[in-house]
Image (cartoon, helix red, strand yellow):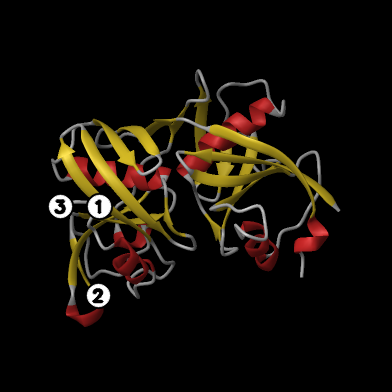
Amino acid sequence: MFLEFTKMHGLGNDFMVVDLISQRAYFDSLTIQRLADRHFGVGFDQLLVVEPPDVPNADFKYRIFNADGSEVEQCGNGVRCFARFVHERQLTSKTKIKVQTKAGIVEPELGQNGWVRVNMGQPKFLPQEIPFIADEPDNLYDLMLANEEKLSIDVVNMGNPHAVTIVQDILTADVARLGPQIESHERFPQRVNAGFMQILDEQHARLRVFERGVGETLACGTGACAAAVSGMRRGLLASKVEIELAGGKLQIEWKEGDVVWMTGPTANVYEGRLDLRYFQG
């Protein structure tokens, strides 16, 4: 069974994007893991799937699968690539679309030169909305890690769950050691994305994200939104900021009680066609 796909990335956060409106395929967890392998498969952080919507007010349905095969609610870099993909594949002539996700409707808008602005919806902070186990809501929480190490975190849901901690220098932050501990911590029943943010000034910050089901990526769109909102809530960042990740920069805008706006680039890498039978169990 031959399957057409497009390899894309947003700031180095890379995707295999598949149109399941004009073609048919089924992806189980093992197949996704094999496709995601960077030596024996296509290689990607996430598989993005375009489907017809289930709700009347959406143009498309958008499904996201991590490299380990797990399905997640949202992907900020992915939704920008999604918007460019459906437009360039002529699945729509609209430059502003409504996209159904597991986290609700998001609204990306195509700009010039592959840049896309996205209404990411309102952030959520209550423990049950993350989800996060806590006795009561708070602005910051102490998270106990291995060897009685304590980490101060903020929790934000931007369609998927994020734990944000502020570090002095992201270059020396021990993301490889701390990331997996935070991701799988027992207080996050659905796991969590772990963000490590360095504040440069009120309009600039740097960020590294250890994504659940993937590991550290070159960029994370929802992670940038969560980190920016966390910094704004703490009074450390202005309402419009530039978040610098390893793969490039995103612009994030937010005011208390409003939606979060994310603006950033997308890129096509190549078009491909493969026989899916070689990757199925």
Q: Position of residue 52 (x, y in %)?
A: 71, 41
Looking at the rendering, which quadrant does residue 190 occupy?
bottom left
Q: Amino acid at mark 1?
A: Leu
The picture places residue 194, in percent across and down from the top left corner, at 34, 59
Around disc 2, counting alpha carbons within 10 Å, would you say few (fewer than 14), some (14 to 19), or many (20 or more)? few
Residue tagged 1? 171
Extreme residue in the top direction:
112
Q: Are marks 1 and 3 in contact (CB under 8 Å)?
A: no
From this view, report whether residue 23 is shown above or below residue 264: below
Q: Is residue 77 left or right of residue 274?
A: left
Q: Residues within 10 Å of mark 1 (few under 14, many from 20)?
A: few
Q: CA distance from mark 3 to mark 2?
A: 19 Å
Image marks 2 and 1: residues in contact by CB distance under 8 Å: no
Pointers 3 and 2 in contact (CB under 8 A)? no
Is 20 placed left or right of 77 in the picture? Answer: right
Of residue 134 and residue 194, the one placed in the foreground of this image is: 194
- Foreground pick, 162 / 199: 199
Against 31, residue 21 (above or below) is: above
Give the labeled residue for mark 3: 168
Q: N-terminal of the two: label 3 or label 2?
A: 2
- Judge left or right: residue 185 versus residue 143: right
Residue type at the position of mark 2: Leu
Task: Give the spatial CA distance, label 1 vs label 3.
Answer: 9 Å
